[in-house]
Amino acid sequence: MKKFLLAVAAVVLGSASVQAADLAAHYTKAPMMATAYNWTGFYVGGNVGGQWGSADPSTSTVFAPAGYFAASSVPAINTVGAQGVNSSSVTGGFSAGYNWQLNNAVLGLEGDINYFGFKGSASGSALYPCCAPTGFTVSSQVSADWLATIRGRIGFLAAPTWLLYATGGAAIAEVKGNFNFTDTFSAATESAAIRDTRLGWTAGVGTEYAVGGGWSLKAEYLYVDLGRSTVTSTNLVSGATQYPSNVYTHSIDLKSNIVRVGVNYKFGGPVVARY
């Protein structure tokens, strides 16, 4: 009888231990914590691209009763002096800036300086209406070697590592122009030069993609308007005779489109934990 009771007890205790094991807590492993890219921080970068634009140099003069020109000559000179200069070239340079990320919005301030490479020339000739076959020639040369911008950026994240943005601010460049007038009536000449550090404006759009390790790639379009630079001269001369009453006005109105790609490197910045 004792042996029977011991056997029954062993069976009961074994069943209880099996049930206890089945009732033991099951643990689910927590997902690994990932890090999300954060755009906040200081960055530096480089870019390369191309620009194409126009300068529209202009040369005009005025009629003076005691001056050199006949009344009919002035409109002819002003028409020929309204010239167009187009330029296209490779650009490239360096940039630096700072971004602040606010949820899915990114605000920033960026400055850059680039080789601009704007250069072009134009020339036109016509006969004097009063005095054919004698005539005149007006020529213009325009250049701007460098361009700097200081711009704000505002954008939103299409994805945690993909930024779309608009940008705008100030554009600065040294605009240079050379103007010459000559004629065949009595070898009259006039010349002037512009050397003007222009403060204009720029606006555009771009996209930037973070590839990891602080590096990002970007593509950008900018429109640049440096406004009009103007200079006057009173140095018209024919032989030994000067004609200061025939005042000349020369101007340049420089605008350009820029498309460029670049790479940025961001220093540090906070990292946000995500599951």
Image (cartoon, rainbow, N blue to C red):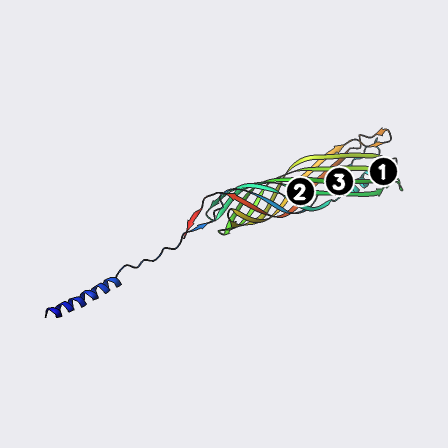
Q: Is residue 8 above or below residue 104?
A: below
In the rendered structure, find residue 183 and report the number of the disc placed on it: 1
For the point 66% across and 39% down, the residue is 146
Identify residue for label 3. 141
Q: State which quadrant residue 235 falls in.
A: top right
Element type at mark 1: strand
For the point 77% across and 37% down, the residue is 179
Would you say the residues marked 3 and 2 are in contact, meaning their CB atoms lie under 8 Å apart?
A: no
Quarter of the figure that contains the N terminus? bottom left
Circle 1: residue type:
Asp
The disc, 3 or 1, on the residue closer to the chain's N-terminal end is 3
Identify residue for label 2. 116
Q: Which sits in the foreground, 93 or 54?
A: 93
Q: State which quadrant residue 47 falls in.
A: top right
The disc, 3 or 2, on the residue closer to the chain's N-terminal end is 2
Q: Would residue 250 appear left or right of 127 to someone viewing this image?
A: left
State the separation of the CA atoms marked 2 and 1.
34 Å
The disc, 2 or 1, on the residue closer to the chain's N-terminal end is 2
Total labels drawn: 3
For the point 69% across and 46% down, the residue is 89
Would you say the residues marked 2 and 1 are in contact, meaning their CB atoms lie under 8 Å apart?
A: no
Whether residue 35 appears in this view of the structure is yes
Q: Which sits in the foreground, 195 or 113?
A: 113
Q: Is residue 9 above or below residue 208?
A: below
Q: Residues within 10 Å of mark 2 (few under 14, many from 20)?
A: many
Residue 78: horizontal and vertical position, in percent? 78, 40
State the separation of the CA atoms marked 3 and 2.
16 Å
